[in-house]
Amino acid sequence: DEAIALFRESLSIRPKDAELLYGLGVALMEKGKLAEAADLARQAVAIAPAMAKAWLLLTQVKRQTERDAELAGMEAEHAKAPQDSLARMQLSFGLGKANDDLKDYGRAFDYFAEGNAIRRKGIDYD
């Protein structure tokens, strides 16, 4: 609750700060306030479309019911994200979840596989 209050206070000073919008969205998601978290994620990606973690947050707090402009926006950012980057991984997981919601399991699997392959490259095995 203290974090939420601090994020809100900070946003009163810097209302267009995508990082603050994202941070408040995460805090609200953890409190179960999913609709408000989704709204904040939408505001963050409107300001910073390449903010992959905000796209991922959006998929975590909403159920994708159709192929809409939000999904198209996330797909466009995925196409632009550098191969093997954290952003590409986050967008892959978000697109996997969105396509799973849409029952497009083949596409969901491909995105999840890509995200996991990127994650695996970042793990140093002996």
Image (cartoon, grey):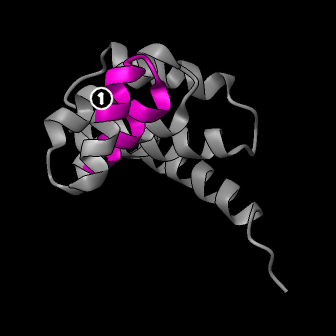
Residue at image location 19% in from the left, 29% down from the top: 65
For the view shown, which residue lies furthest in the bottom direction? 126
Location of the C terminus (image quadrant):
bottom right
Residue 63 occupies quadrant: top left
> Whole-percent x and y of residue 26?
34, 47
Residue at image location 59% in from the left, 51% down from the top: 115
In this rendered view, identify the residue nearer to me: 84 or 48.
Answer: 48
> Can residue 11 be found in the magenta stretch?
yes
Residue annotated with mark 1: 40
> Whole-percent x and y of residue 96?
43, 44
Residue 28 in sight from this viewpoint: yes
Residue at image location 69% in from the left, 54% down from the top: 118
Residue 40 occupies quadrant: top left
Location of the N terminus (image quadrant):
bottom left
| Number of numbered callouts drawn | 1
In the image, is residue 53 above or below residue 31?
above
Residue 55 in sight from this viewpoint: no
Residue at image location 76% in from the left, 38% down from the top: 83
In this rendered view, identify the residue nearer to me: 34 or 7.
Answer: 7
Give amino acid for label 1: Leu
In the image, is residue 69 above or below residue 17?
above
Helix, strand or loop at mark 1: helix
> Whole-percent x and y of residue 60?
31, 46
> Whole-percent x and y of residue 91?
53, 38
For the view shown, which residue lies furthest in the right direction? 126
> Which region is colored magenta?
9-27
